[in-house]
Image (cartoon, grey):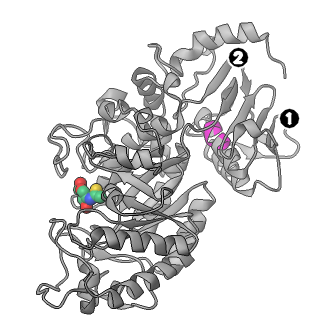
Amino acid sequence: MNFPSRLGAALLGLATAAAIGCGSSPAADAPEATGPVVHLVPVPQSIDIFPGALRLSDAVKLESDAAAPHARRALEEALAGSGIGIDDAATTRIRLQLTDDTALGEEGYHLVVADDVQLSARTDVGLLHAVQSLRQLLPAQPQPGYRLPRVAITDAPAYPWRGLSLDVARSFLSVGYLEKTIDRMAFFKLNRLHLHLTDDQGWRIEIGRYPKLTQIGGASAVEGGRSGHYTQAQLRHLVAYAQARGITIVPEIDLPGHVQAALASYNELACDDVENLSPYSGREVGFSVLCLDKPEVVYPFVRHVLEEVLAIFPSREIHIGGDEIEHPLYADFVARAAAMVQGMGRTPIVWEEGSVADTSPDVVLQLWNDNYDIAPAVEEGHPLILSPCSYFYVDHGNYAGQSQTYDWCREEGVPLARLYAFDPAAFGTAIGIEAALWTELVHTDAAADNRLWPRLAASAELAWSPAERRSYEGFRQRMGALRPHMDALGIGYHPEPDLGWADAGARTVPQGAPAGPSSD
Ligand code: TNX
């Protein structure tokens, strides 16, 4: 590699770090003389920036390890997006290489831009992350003669679980929208898509043994929302689509409450004295429950459903809900359902309330109320997914008073800066972070985009980047500069003033790029 001395590089790195870390110089459109500016989200574990730049011509030569097909495809896509062709005769080389550098872990990578570009990692997933970093260094639109900054990055995630939970039950989201969301998540190195597949207002997953779950339960939705369901073939497609982008889909079947759609489909799942067995389209929570006094009906149902769910989703973790229900047999149910999942060779996830049940310490708990006393469960060693609502419930406003948002958890909403201020280190057994989009009030793709972005990028940085590398000021600059990439991805993001995006509509939308900012 033709690099200057480490010291020189480090000094230069400091000078250029403004765009990377916490400085205050503008991140985008730096003049040619100072070289291209680096703006990566999430901010990498370590980066050296060197003088000069690698001028990219129309085409590059691609060399890749046959064992990294997903990274190769992602790289081809990224290059195409920047208008760069692939040609074996080209002088500039991009190399994807698997290495046995154990320090990188499962997801870490090296990315070096010198006289050529070298991406290395232990796994295809690690290389996928390297490609995403390269993609953020490349122009969002074709730009002939683009100068790629010379960098040496070593990167790996702080947390293994970097998720998004989407409620497709209250209001359905199409396969196409989920694919788009997966692409966008991958761009920010998020790796878990949790689908809340069932709730009072809708049952969204085809179960062969119980066809009425989708015939009846899939036909309803929250008032104003969309109904529908996914076939098993569609879900298998999504699993593969996500896997090729480094993302695991985690299914949730919410039990034993939030089941009105199931009760409306199969009345025998309800206790005999339950009168209301109609489909539900309101917004109340906590009123429906499987009849736990009929274990001979309920447990076979749960088993059969889970068997089909597990056959579709290879995820090690399977979410069985467990939220917002008061019942004398609640703890018993959670313990039995969790044991059932474990008996099938998987690891259950339960919302925080499930911590009252007698389960083995490897059962994962998902924290969602800020004030929930999770300390005893942490003491027992339960891994935690962190989704405290006053930081990560993005059904709350981007700003106080935003229309069509909830504010039950935090009256002022969950602005970007608030979310970014979260400190995951406060939770000893945390395995990561998951933002959650509930859809009682989110009925269109545009509204979903608006609630998710840019906040999801901030939660990605919290889960990926070490605390000492993070600062809101640095994030604002880097994220602000990624706007053309957000546009190229067709994201209808909230025009966040903190990122300098408040001029919604003023910019030119590139041809073929949909939507753009949306205040929906
Ligand atoms: C709480 S978080 C819920 C959801 C609602 C959400 C609305 C959780 C486990 N339950 O059922 O959709 O609040 O913000």
Rendering quarter of residue 237: bottom right
Residue 82 visible in the shown view: yes
Q: Is residue 282 left or right of residue 115?
A: left
| Stretch of the chain drawn in magenta | 130-134
Residue 272 percent across, percent down from the top left:
17, 91
Q: Splitting the image into 4 quarters, where does residue 343 fall? A: bottom right
Residue at far right of view: 89
Check disc 2 and give the amino acid type: Phe
Viewer-nearest residue: 238 or 322: 322
Viewer-proximal residue among 468 and 8: 468
Image vertical order of residue 179 relative to residue 291, above or below: above
Helix, strand or loop under label 1: loop
Q: Residue at x 28, y 90 (%)?
A: 266
Q: Is residue 459 magenta?
A: no
Name the residue that disc number 2 marks.
Answer: 50
Quadrant containing the N terminus in the rendered view: top right
Q: From the top left corner, tell me how far across and down residue 475 is, in percent.
A: 44, 27
Q: Which residue is mark 1?
A: 91
For badge 1, the amino acid type reads Thr
Q: Is the residue at mark 2 in contact range of ligand 1, meaning its CB lies under 8 Å from it?
A: no
Horizontal and vertical percent position of residue 389:
28, 46
Mark toward the viewer: 2 or 1: 2
